[in-house]
Amino acid sequence: MQLKPLGKYVLKCPRCGYEVEPSPYIMRCPRCGELLDASIITEKIRIKWGELRGRGVWRYRDLLPELKNVITMSEGSTPLIRLRAYPNAYVKFEGANPTGSFKDRGMTVGVSLASSLGVRGIIVASTGNTAASAAAYSARAGIECMVVLPKGGVAKGKLGQALLHGARIVEVPGTFDNALEYVLSTVLESGSAGNASYYPLNSINQWRLEGQKTIAYEIVEEVGVPDYVFVPVGNGGNIYAIWKGFGELMELNIIDKMPKMIGVQASGAAPLVKYWRGLGEARVDKPSTVASAIRIGKPINWYRAYRAVKYSNGFFIDASDDEILMTQRVLGREGVGVEPASAASLAGYMKALREGVIDPSDNVVLIATGHALKDPDALLRDSVHTVSISSIDELKALIMGRSIIDV
Ligand SMILES: Cc1ncc(COP(=O)(O)O)c(C=O)c1O
Ligand SMILES: N[C@@H](CCOP(=O)(O)O)C(=O)O
């Protein structure tokens, strides 16, 4: 593949400043090993913000790689829902994507690139959503997909999706961190995926993240720049991608301020909160939380996520499993069904309000990353209150508010 499809980019190392020609295969800085930024060259961008056409991720094609084969299922253009309980808070409901999570925004770009490269297939490690999305998009592209999962660590809905879409499923002992190590050690040599027949599409891949940055573009088009954006953080790719999206609109003079990026982690899997508080490296050895999607102890994008939060003047905050499950119900009672990891953004927002770190008058967007149906076990954790009846009269009595014992 010629470099033209990536011609509007330069790969830049955020650590040592080294610059590399854009390539689908190079992900780490050849000099210091840091993950590279795919920086757009502003002078090469011709975008008329007020005249965008189409919907979803590819509405912003002027700010994305120009690929030969575009594998799309109309991902993106997700609803922004104002909360009754918190009128200055909007939920960006990523559960409305084709496979039920924000990963589809990344996979449409990543799998389009893989398909344009003509590779045999793609490979990902996953806590479930990346696997579901990779499986679906590779099925559409007609290429193979291998997913490497932590055995017993993936919610049923996501596992079912990977199966449904025909992925080869490999389970490994340990956590997601171990699964990612298997994948990266197999397909990345010195930060390059040059010889791999399975193209790696975890968030280490900067081209996949280009799709995810469109969350920022959609927010700006719909409500302008909020004061804060709350994002659940696991491997750290998404908060970085969203921050990058806002940053590009600043560079292009489309917006004139940045939102503060707030990273929310589950208390039992909070390496970035730990690092933010100056309590050591951004890693924990035994991540543990009910929110399996963010049960990650060694976020590969930790430096990307850290930069997003630090340079936007935001902060990291944690939420306990009880808080996460409680906020999942709060959203549920507003009609918004999210999986536990996604409820972390509201849990973080409520905690920040309680602690007085932010004000109820601030405008916030909470990224709700995945759909409730992904993790049915989490929905059925509490005892299920149902009423069993066996006659129409009993139902009538219930509707009239009478006890069915009186019938
Ligand atoms: C539902 C859900 N929320 C949040 C995250 C965290 O995103 P990231 O790993 O990009 O930080 C993930 C995956 O990691 C996820 O599947
Ligand atoms: N939650 C993620 C885990 C990491 O995937 P990434 O490639 O986005 O870092 C998942 O769904 O697997």
Image (tube, grey):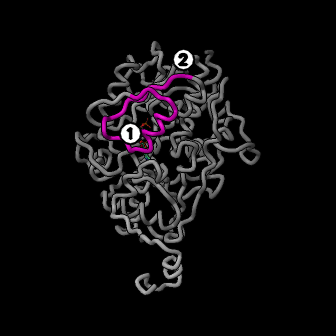
Name the amino acid, label 1.
Thr
User: Which sits in the foreground, 21 or 272?
Assistant: 272
Residue 227, given in percent of the width and then of the height, sits at: 52, 59
Quarter of the image where the N terminus is located: top right
Mark 1 closeness class: few <14, some 14–19, many ≥20 residues within 10 Å: many
User: Is the CB of mark 1 within 8 Å of ligand 2?
Assistant: yes
- Evaluate whether residue 402 shows in this view: yes
Residue 135, given in percent of the width and then of the height, sits at: 50, 32
Give the residues in magenta.
143-169
Marked residue nearer the N-terminal end (2 or 1): 2
Instruction: Name the residue tied to disc 1.
Output: 127
Q: CA distance from mark 2 to mark 1?
A: 24 Å
User: Which sits in the foreground, 308 or 25?
Assistant: 25
Residue 61, given in percent of the width and then of the height, sits at: 67, 35
User: Which sits in the foreground, 278 or 146?
Assistant: 146
Residue 212, given in percent of the width and then of the height, sits at: 54, 40
Name the amino acid, label 2.
Val
Q: Quadrant of residue 147?
A: top left
Q: Quadrant of residue 125?
A: top left
Q: Which mark, by number, is residue 119?
A: 2
Residue 60 lies in magenta, yes or no? no
Mark 2 closeness class: few <14, some 14–19, many ≥20 residues within 10 Å: some
- Evaluate whether residue 17 shows in this view: no
User: Which sits in the foreground, 270 or 180?
Assistant: 180
Q: Which mark, by number, is residue 300?
A: none
- Ligand 2 lies in quarter: top left
